[in-house]
Image (spheres, grey):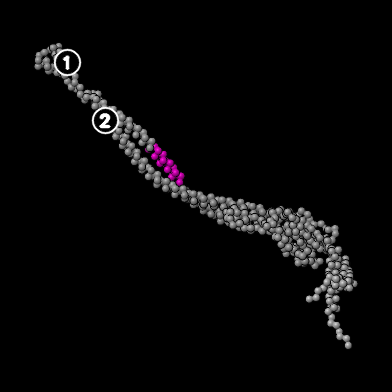
Amino acid sequence: MEEISLRELIEILLRQKKLIIGITLIALVTAYIVSFFVLDPVYESKAILMASGINRNTPQVTGQNEGIQALLDTMSQYPEMTIETYKEQLSNPQILQQTIDELKLGEINITRRSLKNMISLSTIKDTNLITITVQYHDKKVATNIANTLAKKFTNFVSDMAKEQATKSSNFIMQQMEVEKDNLEAALLEYKNYLSQPRGKGELESELQSKLALVTQYKTDIINTELEIQKNNSALKAAEQALKNTSDKITLNKSLSDEPYLSQIAGENTGKTTKELYTVKVQSEEINDAYIELKKQADLLKIELATNTALKSNLEKQILNTQKELEVLQVELAEKQYEDRIISQKVEFAQNTYDSFQEKYEETRIAKSSAIGDATIIIVSPAVEPMQPVGPRKALNMAIAGVLGIMLAVFIAFFKDYWKSSAPVKAEN
């Protein structure tokens, strides 16, 4: 390969300088004529909107089940738009066609496609402001288009939110009737449950009564045991007293103290009563103290036997009542479980119905409100621009100059190469 030095390249450019200058001047003149005399001036009009609740990120669906309330919130919430959604909706064919029809843009040959190309949407960093920019060679038309687009877009968002609210309201109303039937069925089931014999309340009262009865039995046993202890102590004392007391007593009396014996003795002996007075007799009689102690001991034995039998009976009563309590507690536990299940069913049905009813009222109000006016606010309507933004004449000429020089240099090198590579003709 042949090496080409920088000097040779510069020499080529110097030899072709007239060609390079000429082509460059032609490009500059052409750009000047086109920019100043051919291209129409382009005006840029801007309308600024403020969007509330704008979401710059793509919504993510959570995998957690948050219950009926979360489902209702999802169904009844207004459409949440990202910035990309706003961009797409601003170029919605419906909005574009409404703008064309209202401004009669068809008369100046503006179609939906050309109108879409005239519109650009941007956001101001770290704000919720949206800028609608329209470029057109007629500044008044550009301004009208920007303001009409902003208004139509606001109406579109409002209509979309109302449509969503209407759909949600209709669905919630239908489901609310279903939940109402479920609630009535649950209430009827609970009513039938309460009308059953031996319900939870009755069993609880009976259980408390049985527990109180067992407590009373145990108290009576304690009192009976105290009585038995007293009986045993008293009986031991009585028996000890009986051992120390004779059942009979010997009495020394005068014969005159016994009228019957005195009469018989007088008849048999012929002695007078006075004479018999000095006669002494000895007799045995039953000891009244012994008899009294015997009676007391017998009564104590009877009372001890009665208290012992009472204690045994109380123990049997406690045992029987405790068995009844065990059966009653099992029955009560079953009733409590059944009551809890039915109560939870009624509570769930009531809460579900209340949630649907509350959301229905919210969606009903939402249908009659201008959601779009609250979501999208036109903070700065478009005004007619003072100066055109295009064509950028200086920039066009600079670009033309650079392109002209590049083309001229290429042609210069190609021309020099063509000459140098041509075959040399042989001399005759």
In the rendered image, residue 207 lying in the magenta stretch gets the answer yes
Closest to the observer: 93 or 411?
Answer: 411
Decide: is 202 above or below 159.
above
Residue under numbered circle 1: 254
Decide: is 134 above or below 352.
below
Q: In the rendered image, which quarter contains the C terminus?
A: bottom right
Picture residue at 84% right of the left edge, 74% below the top: 413
Closest to the observer: 409 or 400?
Answer: 409
User: Which amino acid, mark 1?
Assistant: Ser
Instruction: Place residue 237 in its image quadrant.
Output: top left
| Horizontal arrangement in the rendering, residue 368 relative to residue 136 (left or right) | left
x then y, percent, for residue 58: 66, 58
Q: Which mark is residue 298?
A: 2
Instruction: Place residue 253 in its image quadrant.
Output: top left
Q: Earlier in the sequence, mark 2 or mark 1?
A: 1
Residue at the right extreme, as displayed: 18
- Which residues are the magenta region? 199-217
x then y, percent, for residue 133: 78, 60
Decide: is 395 above or below 418.
above
x then y, percent, for residue 77: 65, 55
Picture residue at 28% right of the left edge, 32% below the top: 302
In the rendered image, residue 177 lying in the magenta stretch gets the answer no
Picture residue at 53% right of the left edge, 54% below the top: 182
Element under label 2?
helix
Magenta segment's dominant SS is helix
Q: Which mark is residue 374?
A: none
User: Which amino acid, mark 2?
Assistant: Asp
| Horizontal arrangement in the rendering, residue 207 relative to residue 344 (left or right) | left
Estimate how packed mark 1 is, as few (under 14), some (14 to 19) or many (20 or more) residues with alpha carbons within 10 Å: some
Picture residue at 69% right of the left edge, 57% below the top: 56
Q: Is residue 409 visible?
A: no
Element under label 1?
strand
